[in-house]
Image (spheres, rainbow, N blue to C red):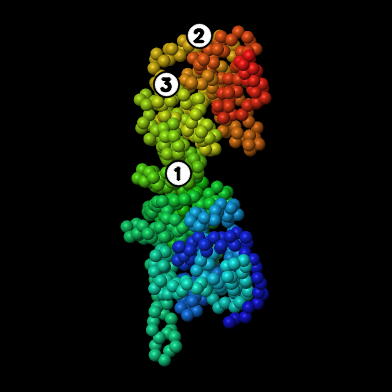
């Protein structure tokens, strides 16, 4: 036992304690994954070393043959993992194995319910990594030495996975990390060569460097213990360099879990090799579920970048647009230089053309998923739809393609689920319909019952119902799809084009003419509150409605801007009334100007309420209404 100095005991960050507790209780049914997680870390550590050694070859001193070794001791009930990767310094160990450095972690922990089944899913989403060792071990020792540091700067970390851990400085002969798991009683099954080999084959076959196990050699006569001979148990080649036809689905799936730190299988993947002017391979995955930090600005995103098989960086963000930030994968280029930096990536024209090709691959993959696996695509949309909606604004070139992937709720179907695609909408459009109609609003309940939909109901025309916060903004970037333009049914002077017959139009004109007097009276009564007053052809049941001016901001955008403290340009609505509604007929017949004024304002305020807006002067509304009620009851 080497001498330990500078020993100290430190407490885990609260979130680590919570994670440990949860993991031990929720992942118990899948406990063998601890090995996958530790091998995944070891493989990352070797990747990092290989990369750093490009500029500092001396880091490879004492062994350039990079590998992971897994061994066990049946009697001592231990499993040991050893890698000769980058290793950790004392400070590294304290931060990496004592805290969780992901933004939003505390918020995430609040979502956990205590229900083990649900939590095990959530925890999978979060990624467990190193701490999963405590699923099977009641004590873990880590010995590590950062590559390039002297033997005297080794560090020993030790913990029982409860509240605290110990660190001490020790001598360590070689660089890299050795992790010793002291198995809990009842977990000795893992101290077994056959079991370990199976787990490695199952989860870690795709790891690109050798994973070695001791050969089961019998002790030679007179020897107490046989000399250890090692044998590689995994395939040890980079998965993305292999031809597609030779890679099994399970291998793709396990590789995904390794790079994405996800527990679940991906929904879909796309593996390609590009040759010609540019040479690169890519393997891109669509996750099945959103990571807990999808909307965190600093959340990890981007691909793992390799240059000629050598790992160069994680989270290379320049290869995909932001609205595809949930895509995980690897890109391996033959053209980039090994000392490429993030700054260079941002400017390199090679990257631009790779980015547009990779973007197209992802969109194609999503199209295929939508077409062949509509149920899975529904799930995809639930998780990532909101992010995809950022697409048309960010990626002008692919606007049409992205639009085709969007899904909306509509007046067909009544549960508000976003399942209608634009192609499907157009395929079942009315004959003569050359527009795509939509309505935006705060909630599904509100838009579903909006008076703006009355005429569409009557004519049996489908309207898309958009209630995500981002929707109005999204629609400002979409003008048409498949040659058909989008029309906000709450905006401007609704023209149903060919959907109105000539007779309908004529009749409408005549009615409008006959109501010119009423229009003028209403204009006087409503005065500054409205931009215009006119006869409506949107209404069948409601007396009146407020339409938004063609160029004005909609309610949603106005509310978003106001909430962010911006000054919003003043805009007035257009008051439209339904000439055949009994209330309007009554209004038209009203002799008293005072009563006419009260009734008009009440109708105006009601229309604002029905549109989901708040009243400028609610007290005045109540006063007028009560006045009428009193008159009624006399
Ligand atoms: P993650 O791998 O998701 O970052 P982990 O909890 O698994 O989270 O590991 C935390 C960090 O500890 C890693 O990011 C890495 O910096 C460090 N680490 C873990 N295992 C090793 C190892 N075998 N060699 C070097 N560093 C390691």
**Mark 1 close to ligand 1, CB under 8 Å:** no
* Secondary structure at numbered mark 3: helix
> How many angstroms separate mark 1 from mark 3 (CA)?
33 Å
Which mark sits nearer the N-terminus, 1 or 3?
A: 1
Q: How many marks?
A: 3
Which mark sits nearer the N-terminus, 3 or 2?
A: 3
Residue 509 lies, with reference to residue 179, above or below; the image says: above
Which mark sits nearer the N-terminus, 2 or 1?
A: 1
Residue 98 location, x and y as percent?
Answer: 60, 64
> Foreground residue, 527 or 610?
610
> How many angstroms separate mark 2 from mark 1 (CA)?
50 Å
Q: Quadrant of residue 409?
A: top left
State the residue position of label 3. Answer: 497
Residue shown at 50% from the left, 69% from the top: 136
Looking at the rendered structure, which numbered label has been put on residue 514? 2
* Secondary structure at numbered mark 1: helix
Q: Quadrant of residue 480?
A: top left
> How many angstroms separate mark 3 from mark 2 (CA)?
23 Å
> Foreground residue, 399 or 29?
29
Residue 21 lies, with reference to residue 509, above or below; the image says: below
Kindly report which numbered mark, 1 or 3, lies closer to the viewer in this rendering: 1
Residue shown at 48% from the left, 63% from the top: 28
Looking at the rendered structure, which numbered label has been put on residue 381? 1
* Secondary structure at numbered mark 2: helix
Kindly report which numbered mark, 3 or 2, lies closer to the viewer in this rendering: 2
Quadrant for the N terminus in the image: bottom right
């Amino acid at each position: 036992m080497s001498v330990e100095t500078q020993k100290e005991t430190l407490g885990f960050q609260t979130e680590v304690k919570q994670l440990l507790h949860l993991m031990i209780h929720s992942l118990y049914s899948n406990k063998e994954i601890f090995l996958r997680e530790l091998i995944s870390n070891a493989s990352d550590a070797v990747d990092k070393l290989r990369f750093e050694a490009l500029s500092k070859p001396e880091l490879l001193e004492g062994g350039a043959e990079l590998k992971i070794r897994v061994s066990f001791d049946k009697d001592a009930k231990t499993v040991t993992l050893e890698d000769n990767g980058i290793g950790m310094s004392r400070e590294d160990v304290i931060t990496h194995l004592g805290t969780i450095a992901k933004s939003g972690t505390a918020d995430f922990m609040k979502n956990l319910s205590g229900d083990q089944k649900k939590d095990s899913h959530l925890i999978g989403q979060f990624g467990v990594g190193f701490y999963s060792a405590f699923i099977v071990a009641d004590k873990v020792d880590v010995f590590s030495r950062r590559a390039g540091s002297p033997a005297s700067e080794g560090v020993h970390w030790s913990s029982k996975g409860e509240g605290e851990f110990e660190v001490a400085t020790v001598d360590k002969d070689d660089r890299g990390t050795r992790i010793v798991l002291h198995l809990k009683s009842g977990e000795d099954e893992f101290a077994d060569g056959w079991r370990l080999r199976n787990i490695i084959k199952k989860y870690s076959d795709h790891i690109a460097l050798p994973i070695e196990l001791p050969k089961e050699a019998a002790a030679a006569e007179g020897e107490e213990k046989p000399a250890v001979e090692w044998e590689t148990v995994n395939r040890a080649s980079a998965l993305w360099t292999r031809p597609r036809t030779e890679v099994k689905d399970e291998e793709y799936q396990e590789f995904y879990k390794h790079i994405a730190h996800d527990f679940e299988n991906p929904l879909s993947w796309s593996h390609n090799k590009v040759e010609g002017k540019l040479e690169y391979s890519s393997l891109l995955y669509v996750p099945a579920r959103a990571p807990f930090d999808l909307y965190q600005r600093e959340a990890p995103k981007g691909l793992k970048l390799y240059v000629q098989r050598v790992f160069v960086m994680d989270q290379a963000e320049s290869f995909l647009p932001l609205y595809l930030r949930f895509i995980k994968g690897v890109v391996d280029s033959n053209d980039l230089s090994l000392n490429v930096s993030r700054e260079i990536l941002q400017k390199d024209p090679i990257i631009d053309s790779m980015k547009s090709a990779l973007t197209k691959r992802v969109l194609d993959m999503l199209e295929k998923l939508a077409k062949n696996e509509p149920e899975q695509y529904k799930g995809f949309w639930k998780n990532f739809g909101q992010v995809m909606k950022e697409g048309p604004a960010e990626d002008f070139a692919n606007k049409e393609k992205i639009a085709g992937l969007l899904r909306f709720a509509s007046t067909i179907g009544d549960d508000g689920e976003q399942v209608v695609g634009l192609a499907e909408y157009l395929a079942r459009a009315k004959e003569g319909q050359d527009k795509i109609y939509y309505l935006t609003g705060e909630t599904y309940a509100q838009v579903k019952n909006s008076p703006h939909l009355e005429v569409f109901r009557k004519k049996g025309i489908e309207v898309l119902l958009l209630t995500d916060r981002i929707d109005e903004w999204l629609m400002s970037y979409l003008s048409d799809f498949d040659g058909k333009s989008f029309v906000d049914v709450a905006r401007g002077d609704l023209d149903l084009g060919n959907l109105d017959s000539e007779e309908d139009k004529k009749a409408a004109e005549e009615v409008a003419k006959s109501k010119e007097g009423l229009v003028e009276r209403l204009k006087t009564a409503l005065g500054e509150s409205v931009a215009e007053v006119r006869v409506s052809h949107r209404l069948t049941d409601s007396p009146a409605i407020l339409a938004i001016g063609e160029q004005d901001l909609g309610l949603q955008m106005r509310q978003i801007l106001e909430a962010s403290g911006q000054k919003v340009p003043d805009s007035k609505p257009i008051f439209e009334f339904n000439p055949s509604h009994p209330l309007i007929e009554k209004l038209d017949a009203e002799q008293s100007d005072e009563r006419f004024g009260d009734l008009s304002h009440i109708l105006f305020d009601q229309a604002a309420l029905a549109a989901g807006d708040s009243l400028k002067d609610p007290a005045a509304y109540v006063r007028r209404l009560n006045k009428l009620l009193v008159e009624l009851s006399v």
